Image: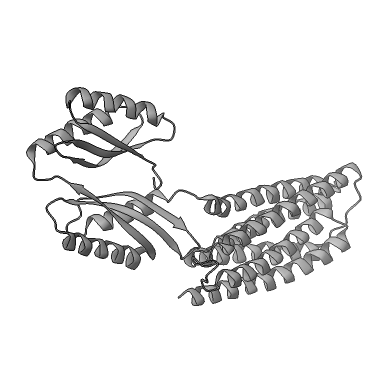
Amino acid sequence: MKQSRNNQITKVSIVGIGANAVIATFKVIVGLLSNSVAVLLDAINNVSDALSSAITIIGIKLAGRKPDSKHPFGYGRVEYFSAILVAGIIFAAGVSSMIESVKAIINPEPTSFTWVSVMVIVVAIVGKLLLGRYFQIRGKALNSDALVASGLEASFDAVLSAATLLGAAVSMIWSINIDGYIGVIISAFIIKTGIETLLDPLGKVVGKRVQGDLAAAIKSKVNEVPGVLGAYDLILHDYGPDTAIGSIHIEVSDTLSSHQIQKICRRVSALIYSEFKAVMTVGIYVMNDTDADVIAMREDIRQMAMSQDGVQQMHGFYADEEDIAFDIVISFDHDAPTICHWLEEQIVLKYPGKKVHITTDTNYSG
């Protein structure tokens, strides 16, 4: 499965290299013949696109290496680093283009476009639109940030090529040179694309929160397993586009035997791997669901907790003759120690003689 995905990404990237090389060659010829810095910068941008595709191929090959003793989680994150490197190349190309465009504004030189050069630019625009669409469709299908980024960049390139076409038209019709200004616009878009391309893979390397819809889907599936009373504390670590490892807590009745609980845990971990290709450790919260007094106490304390701004959830509640224990999830923008201290005081006042144990959980999965 992984090898097939890698091969398909490689094939798409090779198509990108070939297409960008052809387009860049024609643009260089047009740029030199017409003495247009905007067209030449546009050609350089296509060369950077081809280089980006080459880096994507290298990255996917390295990311496909099997896990070993030094890297037991595999090399999948190398693919994110390749996407970051692609973003850096795009950004650097944009800065370089901006410098040259400003020079062209300060010291403009006459341009000389022909109808043949205009037709070459038009063909290049159509080619980049088709290439961008192809990259985005395949990138989403193969869950490849690098391909999606290349597709977005190709689509932007088509817009930027349209800007050079506008410059050529103005030059041919009114003999006004706006070449440098067009180059500045192109450069600004390239820089913007580089920054935007950087954010997603960088976020995944740093430790981006699990998408809310994915977290909801996993918890929903877990709650369908017979015997599961609730699913909480989902943590998912991304080790590449098709490798995820994490943990989740499930709530079960305190009337179940250890054998029954183990059976439920194995069903949960197998289900998550089958549906989401994620290896999960399953933790247990035991719920008193038969003692009416404990049930009433749990709902009373839940109301106390949820009355405080910033408290998003309470779970894992358990109480016996001596202790009351539960977890609460508090939003990042509220002071957790202050909320927990207030809540502990309120519980001790209402249920004297009990030891209160509050664990503050972090909302890792949205």
- Image position, residue 78 (x, y; %): 59, 63
- Image position, residue 314 (x, y; %): 27, 38
Q: Nearer the viewer, residue 89 or 274?
A: 274
Q: Nearer the viewer, residue 101 or 122?
A: 101
Q: Residue at x 12, y 38 (%)?
A: 294
Q: Nearer the viewer, residue 255 or 14?
A: 255
Residue 194, compared with residue 154, is above or below; it is above
- Image position, residue 144 (x, y; %): 53, 64
Is 59 on the left-hand or right-hand side of 262? right
- Of the 4 image quadrants, the one containing the C terminus is top left
Q: Residue at x 31, y 27 (%)?
A: 308
Is 117 on the left-hand or right-hand side of 282? right
Specify the farthest residue to the top.
349
> Residue 327 lies in what quarter of the image?
top left
Is 1 on the left-hand or right-hand side of 76? left
Q: Residue at x 66, y 59 (%)?
A: 86
- Of the 4 image quadrants, the one containing the N terminus is bottom left
- Image position, residue 166 (x, y; %): 74, 51
